[in-house]
Image (tube, helix red, strand yellow):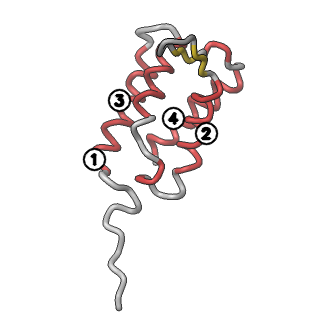
Amino acid sequence: MTRMPDKYRGWQDPVGQLVRIRAALDIMLSFRNNYRKRMEDVTSVLATVRRETVPKRIRPLIDRIMDVRVSVRKDYGHGNTLWHFENLTPGQRKQLRADILNLYEA
């Protein structure tokens, strides 16, 4: 039995994924809000990109981005949650930006 080539190279819904990733990049580069709010919005959009729907080589990027999101999460009760991206070190901020750009380029 001959295996069919993977038409989308491991991506499920490649157009939808691109739209979400592009939206996240646009938010990151917009400078409309402060860093904390902007990165909260960026990672919120990227949270809709499920790791099972991207090629295996891309999953470490998604994992790192979501790990950072989890690490800065603070619950204040009654459904009030903030993501304190402002607490990231300059190196962590640089890595997060690089991961988001690399995700877009992938």
Secondary structure of the residue carrying numbered label 4: helix
Query: Which picture quadrant has residue 104?
Result: top left
Q: How crowded is mark 2: few (under 14 residues within 10 Å), some or many (20 or more)?
A: some
Give how far across and how far down residue 34 sits, in percent. Answer: 50, 8
Up/down of 45 relative to 32, above or below:
below
Q: Residues within 10 Å of mark 4 (few under 14, many from 20)?
A: many
- Residues marked 3 and 4 touching at CB (< 8 Å): no
Question: Which residue, given by chain and number where applicable, does mark 1 sit on?
Answer: 15
Give how far across and how far down residue 56 sits, in percent. Answer: 52, 58
Q: What residue type is labelled 2?
A: Arg
Q: How far apart are marks 2 and 3 (CA)?
A: 19 Å
Up/down of 49 relative to 2, above or below:
above
Front position among marks 1 and 2 = 2
Mark identifier at residue 64:
2
Secondary structure of the residue carrying numbered label 3: helix
Q: Distance between the residues labelled 4 and 2?
A: 10 Å
Secondary structure of the residue carrying numbered label 2: helix
Question: Which residue, given by chain and number where applicable, does mark 4 sit on?
Answer: 100
Question: Which residue, given by chain and number where applicable, does mark 3 sit on?
Answer: 23
Give the residue drawn at x 52%, y 51%: 58
Q: Which amino acid does label 4 sit on?
A: Ile
Give the residue drawn at x 65%, y 27%: 71
Q: Residues within 10 Å of mark 3 (few under 14, many from 20)?
A: some
Give how far across and how far down residue 27 sits, in percent. Answer: 40, 21
Q: Distance between the residues labelled 3 and 4?
A: 11 Å
Instruction: Indicate left or right for 74 with 89 as reference.
Output: left
- Please state which of residues 85 and 97 is positioned toward the viewer in this rendering: 85
Secondary structure of the residue carrying numbered label 1: helix
| Of pointers 1 and 4, the one earlier in the residue sequence | 1
Up/down of 2 relative to 61, above or below:
below
| Of pointers 2 and 3, the one earlier in the residue sequence | 3
